[in-house]
Image: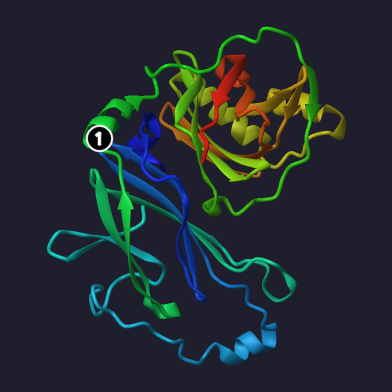
């Protein structure tokens, strides 16, 4: 699902935040990673909340939407969602198809959030600067140019490391902790935040690895954590079988702490403060496996520490990764 990029660290290519804010659409950077093999952009696009009732939407469905003019886009293309391209030195746009796309319809009539689209684009290796062009003519969003500063080639080459041999952040815990489970948080507007730490390997053995791919400061009090996990060989097969066996089975209320710490297939994290470990349920996740391989993505919301050091416990017992303590220094946005 995520290809070779999930196996390789890279440099933060953009600090995050909104690229475009218009009445018909906002587009922000959730994550931008530059590797020697290419530039990967995770973008989130939000449409305005639709306050129309179901009857009103049905009434308007046959009406023609305001269409923005095509200047760099071809007269006809295969897209019906947000399109992204890069502009070369001659002004020509090279359009890219998303490697991944998911969407949700929002809350509609009486809710607070409109339709949301997540896109992952993979571009060729780019350094120093790139001019992007965004377009969604079907909803009236015009072709919009955005110039983005990028890290240079030397920085990218240094940061491009295999997750299987890059340095590991976590070490064995120095003390025992009092364990608690926090309430799962709702998703936040992560595309409005800024990067707070570089990608890094949190925990690893010969067969499994947990990687911090993104740490985003959403506001002064909230961090959004993005993890990926990978396993290989017999360990991957065991985890995949456990995942299949446990899917759809709700946990018993009395053992939520133990369940999160020793989940059937997924890594778990806890925020450590004052000798207590607060295990945090993910708010979004996806997993894939087969042919002696396994990989997953998870997103968490955690409180921002006061001293700019995030203390985490990381564990993945089914993969043979016991609890380890990672101290992550936060960058100042």
Q: Does 165 appear above or below 309?
A: above
Kindly identify the residue that appears in the image at 80 percent across and 26 percent down: 180
In this rendering, is residue 153 above or below 138?
above
Residue closest to the eye, 137 or 309: 309
Observer able to see residue 285:
no
Q: Residues within 10 Å of mark 1 (few under 14, many from 20)?
A: many
**What colour scheme does the image use?**
rainbow
The answer to whether 156 is drawn above or below residue 23 in the figure is: above
Asked whether 210 or 66 is in front, the reply is 66
94 left or right of 259? left
State left or right for residue 13 relative to residue 230: left
Q: Position of residue 114 (x, y in %)?
A: 61, 69
Residue 15 at x, y percent in the picture: 44, 45
Q: How many marks?
A: 1
Residue nearest the viewer, comparing 28 with 333: 333
The quarter holding residue 105 reads bottom right
Q: Is residue 124 left or right of residue 227?
A: left
Q: Residue at x 70, y 42 (%)?
A: 248
Residue plotted at (45% across, 78% down): 139
Question: Which residue matches tag 1?
Answer: 36
User: Residue 298, located in which quarter of the rendered image?
Assistant: top right
Furthest residue to the right?
254
Residue drawn at x 28%, y 79% as measured from the top left: 70
Query: Given the current orientation, which residue lies at the most extreme left position?
Result: 90
Percent position (x, y) of residue 268? 64, 28
The answer to whether residue 212 is seen in the rendering is: yes
Q: Taking 119 as reference, is 273 left or right? A: right
Secondary structure state at the residue bearing disc 1: loop
In the image, residue 96 lies at what x, y percent?
Answer: 28, 59
Vertical order, 234 against 119 (above or below):
above
Question: In the rendered image, which quarter contains the N terminus?
Answer: top left
């Amino acid at each position: 699902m995520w290809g070779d990029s999930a196996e390789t660290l890279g440099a933060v290519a953009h600090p995050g935040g909104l690229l475009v804010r218009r009445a018909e659409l906002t587009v922000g950077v959730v994550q931008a990673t530059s590797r020697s093999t290419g530039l990967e952009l995770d973008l989130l696009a939000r449409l305005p909340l639709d306050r129309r009732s179901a009857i009103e939407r049905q009434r308007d469905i046959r009406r023609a939407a305001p269409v923005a003019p095509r200047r760099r886009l071809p007269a006809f293309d295969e897209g019906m969602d947000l399109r992204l391209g890069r502009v070369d030195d001659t002004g020509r746009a090279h359009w890219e198809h998303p490697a991944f796309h998911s969407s949700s319809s929002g809350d509609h009539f009486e809710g607070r959030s409109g339709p949301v689209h997540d896109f992952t684009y993979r571009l060729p290796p780019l350094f120093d600067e790139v001019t992007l062009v965004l377009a969604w003519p079907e909803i009236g969003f015009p072709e919009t140019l955005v110039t983005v500063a990028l890290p240079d080639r030397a920085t990218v080459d240094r940061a491009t490391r295999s997750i299987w041999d890059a340095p590991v952040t976590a070490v064995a815990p120095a003390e025992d902790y009092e364990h608690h489970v926090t309430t799962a948080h709702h998703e936040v507007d992560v595309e409005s935040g800024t990067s707070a730490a570089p990608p890094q390997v949190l925990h690893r053995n010969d067969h499994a690895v947990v990687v911090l791919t993104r740490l985003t400061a959403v506001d002064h009090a909230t961090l959004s954590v993005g993890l990926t996990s990978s396993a290989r060989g017999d360990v991957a097969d065991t985890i995949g079988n456990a995942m299949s066996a446990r899917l759809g089975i709700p946990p018993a209320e009395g053992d939520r702490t133990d369940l999160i710490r020793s989940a059937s297939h997924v890594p778990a994290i806890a925020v450590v403060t004052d000798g207590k470990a607060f295990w945090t349920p993910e708010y979004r996740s996806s997993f894939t496996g087969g042919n002696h391989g396994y990989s997953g993505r998870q997103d968490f919301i955690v409180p921002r520490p006061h001293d700019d050091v995030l203390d985490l416990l990381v564990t993945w017992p089914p993969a043979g990764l016991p609890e380890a303590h990672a101290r992550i220094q936060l960058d100042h946005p």
